[in-house]
Amino acid sequence: MAKDVHVVTGAFGYSGRWIAKELLNCGHRVRTLTNAIGRDDPFNGQLEVRPINFTDHDSMVSSLSDADVLYNTYWVRYKDREGGYAHDLAVANTRNLISAAEDAGIRRIVHFSVAHPDKAPDWTYFIGKMEVEKMITESKLSHAILRPTVFFGGKRDVLINNMAWLLRRFPVFGVFGLGSYPIQPVHISDVARVAVEQGTLNENVILDVAGPEKFSYYEYVKLISQSMGLRRAIIPLPPIVAWVFGKIVGILVGDRVITRAEIRGLMNGLMASDNKPLGVIKFSEWIEENGTTLGLRYQNDMNERKYQSPSLLYNSPNSAE
């Protein structure tokens, strides 16, 4: 039997949605595995939808048995065991997914990691990312491991939208430290294009996926502010002060605005790449066109993450999302 299905984990989320869109545009039959509820279906029923239960091996094998490629965007952003979020649980769930993919005879996995996971060895978020990469490289699957920097575009870019929301509401914006560390945003459509291109290949690769422009974080914030037609004082703050402010804002809006791992990753230059950029869409041109529409309302990340059961946790990726 020919295997013609392409399976995307979390196609109603951010990166998964764009991968599924690219696959459909290429004429592929697409299935998503997800337990997210209450999310809109932008595909008007074009996708096959099946639940994912990481503890039910036979069910996952069945969902993958006629598939050629698995695009895995699954991860957890937060470390909150009481709420069902923990990086070691994400590692265990991914191990089960990889095992099911092997038993189902999947030809290739295109897996989303994070830029420079090896440069943050003491942080559980990155430790987990490295463990999963090792599982995949040691598996029987042909694989492409993609390491994106930070996404923009696609109308669901929580990070930039909520930065813009803060810029609209406060006359001062604090950057972590001096803001001199690099950030290299990549458009989500470029990421989806690279992912689908890699799905057609067989060579085992690990690729950074970054955009064509690199900024200091200070320049990045200033560019967003200017594109919105705002004049804001951008001031350096001790990281702990900025994190506490984020915690306070998070309490007010019922969300997690920023995590310590995200702050440390950003300040350590993990949101940029030293390799040739694979993205072609320029952030500077995109923000000039879209700045006035950003931050009109706060985008609550936690409210979007609703699941059928905590034991069947599905969460979308990283600070990359």
Image: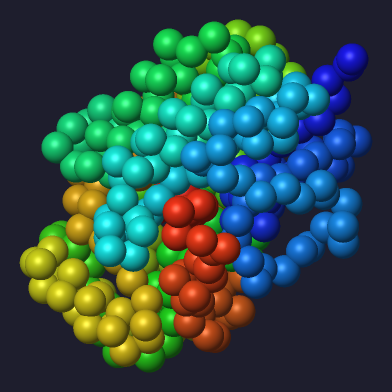
Q: Is residue 179 visible?
A: no
Q: Quadrant of residue 190?
A: top right
Q: Is residue 34 above or below residue 39?
A: above
Q: How is the image coloured?
A: rainbow
Residue 219 percent coordinates (x, y): 34, 60
User: In percent of the image, x 59 and y 17: which residue is there?
Assistant: 102
Q: Which of the pair 276/198 is nearer the observer?
A: 198
Q: Is residue 106 rendered to the left or right of residue 131?
A: right
Q: Quadrant of residue 257?
A: bottom left
Residue 47 percent coordinates (x, y): 82, 49
Residue 229 percent coordinates (x, y): 49, 82
Q: Which of the pair 282/35 is nearer the observer?
A: 35
Report the quarter where the N terminus lies: top right
User: In percent of the image, x 84 and y 42: which residue is there?
Assistant: 24
Q: So how many labels did they put on this image? A: 0
Q: Which of the pair 205/133 is nearer the observer?
A: 133
User: In percent of the image, x 36 and y 59: which residue is there?
Assistant: 84
Residue 54 percent coordinates (x, y): 52, 40
Q: Is residue 271 rendered to the left or right of residue 102?
A: left
Q: Is residue 164 above or below residue 188?
A: below
Q: Is residue 42 visible?
A: yes
Q: Quadrant of residue 166?
A: bottom left
User: In percent of the image, x 22 and y 31: which residue is there?
Assistant: 119
Q: Which of the pair 240/132 is nearer the observer?
A: 132
